[in-house]
Image: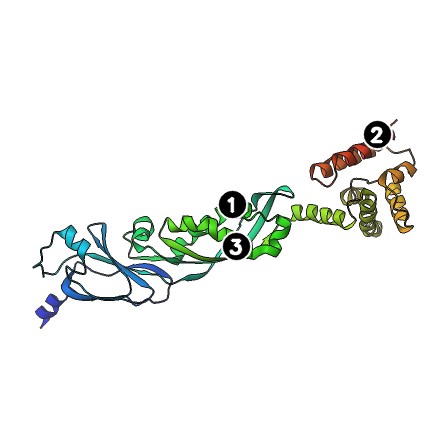
Amino acid sequence: MALMDFIKKQFIDILEWTEDGDGTLAWRFPMAGNEIQYGGSLTVRESQMAVFVNEGKVADVFGPGMYKLTTQTLPVLTYLKNWDKLFQSPFKSDVYFFSTRQQIDQRWGTTQPVAIRDKDFGAVRLRAFGNYAYRVADPKLFHTEISGTRDRYTVGDLDGQLRALMLQHISDAVASSGVPFLDLAANQVEFAQQLATVTAPAFEKIGLKLEGVTVQNVSLPEELQKILDQKIGMGMVGGDMGKFMQYQTAQAIPKFAEGQGGGGGGIAGDAMGLGAGVALGQVLAQNLQQGLQGGGASVGAAAAAAPAAIAPDQVMATIEKLAELKAKGILTEDEFSAKKAELLKKLV
């Protein structure tokens, strides 16, 4: 009886795989030196495919169904082994099963901001994250390019590579969509579609099909968001520099009050950071007063009304701050030049 059991172990007559739900993409049937019985059965379930590999070469590929293993159902293997029509002996072959069901809720996201070109800002660095889903579509290609001869290849083994593929195509997706950054948040579906379109070929090269992509959030780094907020504030007053200065002055008042209440440290510095570069208290106060009176006076008029006795280092610091705002696109060249000229007169 023990001898018969030993003999039976030498031949495998049923080949099948029941997935255990652990995220396995490829699984090698455990042969342990045994041979496959000629005329045995192969069962490939829905959402599976099976591949026979002979001496390192991919032979026959099977989709869902039940098969009797003969020379008729194994034409490539028959050719590789030079079997004749009367062949009925057990044979050796590696058999791999592949899961072709969708692998859903895979996460992608930028660990660092990604630089992209933008029609409004020229260039911005954005952060984004979302989900994607894929499946094994070409098991032969996936075996030769990715999983190889491993006993088991899982979703986790592939996660880092696929995440990198998603991220490296973000810039291409934004460029292809033609959607400015300011509109990306309202067009996340279109952005996701473009990201899927430009990334899908990279998945196909390794035997996968990218089934879908979602974008859950798109944002700017904090420092760029502050600049964007300033441009939005400029837009709220119709681009008028006088009104914008009044708006910034109103924003600065709480900072002055906070500084006075907490010992006064850094008041001038706060004003320099908040206003459009005009850190002089008299100029800010006059701007606010004119705004409240409905005069809508320009920055130039307010500056002219300020006393001429201004320390040179204050003037130079203000000009430097204005230059930074011009470089960031908040001030135009003409606005910067005009304000610079006004401030330089105070040095005379």
Residue type pointed to by label 2 = Leu
Q: Position of residue 25 (x, y in %)?
A: 35, 59
- CB-based contact (under 8 Å), mark 3 and mark 2: no
User: At x 61% / y 55%, what residue is drawn?
Assistant: 185
Q: Position of residue 203 (x, y in %)?
A: 40, 51
**What is the tally of numbered marks visible in this picture?**
3
Give the farthest residue toward the top. 348
Which residue is identified by label 1?
A: 172
Indicate which disc, 1 or 2, sits on the residue closer to the N terminus: 1
Which residue is identified by label 3?
A: 192
Regarding residue 213, the answer to whether it shows in the image is: yes
Q: Quadrant of residue 240?
A: top right
Q: Nearer the viewer, mark 1 or mark 2?
A: 1
Residue nearest the viewer, comparing 109 with 191? 191
- CB-based contact (under 8 Å), mark 1 and mark 2: no
Q: Position of residue 308 (x, y in %)?
A: 91, 33
**Spatial separation of the CA atoms under disc 1 and disc 2:** 46 Å
Residue 27, disc: none
Residue nearest the viewer, comparing 283 with 247? 247
User: At x 75% / y 48%, what residue is drawn?
Assistant: 235
Give the farthest residue toward the bottom. 1
As displayed, is residue 253 above or below residue 46? above
Q: Secondary structure at mark 2?
A: helix
Q: Secondary structure at mark 3?
A: helix
Residue 344, disc: 2
Q: Dot 1, how many residues are within 10 Å of its Cα: few (below 14), some (14-19), or many (20+)?
A: some
